[in-house]
Amino acid sequence: MSDLIDLTRKIQRAVGEDDDGKFGPRTANAVWRALNKGLDIDPELSIKGVDGIDDRSLSVIQTLDPKAQSDFMRFLRLAKATAATLGCDYIFIGGNRTWEEQDALFAKGRTAPGEIVTKARGGYSMHNFGIAADAGVFIGGTYLDDGSTAQQELASKVHRAVSMNAAECGLEWGGNWKTIVDQPHYQIDMGGKTTAQLRKLYKEKGSVL
């Protein structure tokens, strides 16, 4: 963690921000301005507008609960600015899943061929309520999370750096979990509500938000 804080401080000094070691919105905006220096755009508008979001991420966000989409859009703009300082891009690769799709994933490595990929049955994953998304780290078209050891180490570093923006956007980061660490995963912070409570809300209202 100290290496990550030191790197953040170097980035902050390079873009003229206070070097407190915390990568928040001020630093992200400063990085965005530095990246777009000399271009015919207003960087302050760019980070708040509709541009800067790749098509794949946008299609994922559009699968989420409408009330969750703005939080994920805001987070992704900050995440992309953060990832860019490490030479990478941050892209959402998975969003809402039906309960049937979740059950099919749960079956892998159990009653269906393949390796186990989840411990959650349908109705037990935040993806089933449209309030969670998974992200990937990319350089060009190369997906680092499933790459070589060095690529996976860089991806992990990017996930950790990007995660500093999550709480400010109302999101919970799977990398902070104690039992199953899931660095690519982000979900709306539901204040400790259980999956049983969320299932009840979802069945009654069609939304947990």
Image: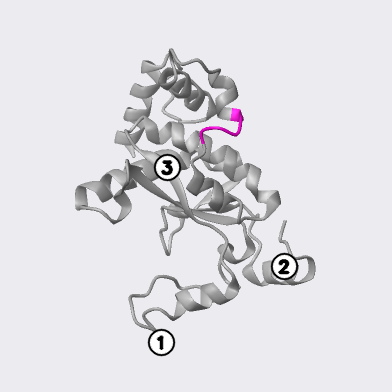
On the image, the x and y values in percent for residue 209 come to 72, 56
Q: Disc 3 residue type? A: Tyr
Q: How far, Cα to Cα, is label 2 from label 3?
A: 30 Å
Distance (Cα) linking label 2 and label 1: 28 Å
Q: Earlier in the sequence, mark 2 or mark 3?
A: 3
* Of the image marks 2 and 1, the number of the one nearer the N terminus: 1
Residue type of the residue flagged with mark 2 = Tyr
Residue 201, given in percent of the width and then of the height, sits at 74, 67
In the rendered structure, find residue 202 and report the number of the disc placed on it: 2
Left or right of residue 76: residue 7 = left
Quickly name the residue at label 3.
90
Q: Looking at the image, which residue is at 46% across and 57% down?
A: 177
Q: CA distance from mark 1 to mark 3?
A: 33 Å
The figure's colour scheme reads one colour
The reply to whether discs 1 and 3 touch (Cβ–Cβ < 8 Å) is no
On residue 111, which mark appears? 1
Characterize the local packing of mark 1: few (<14), some (14-19) or many (20 or more) Cα atoms within 10 angstroms.
Answer: few
Asked if the residues shown at circle 2 and circle 3 are in contact, with their CB atoms under 8 angstroms apart, the answer is: no
**Amino acid under label 1?**
Thr
Decide: is 199 above or below 84: below
The residue that appears at 34% across and 37% down in the rendered structure is 88
> What range is drawn magenta here?
48-52
Q: Secondary structure at mark 1?
A: loop
Residue 160 position by quadrant: top left
The correct choice, above or below, for 140 with respect to 7 in the image is below
Mark 3, Cα crowd under 10 Å, few <14 / some 14-19 / many 20+, is many
Query: SS class of the residue under badge 3?
Result: strand
Residue at the extreme right of the image, as rendered: 204
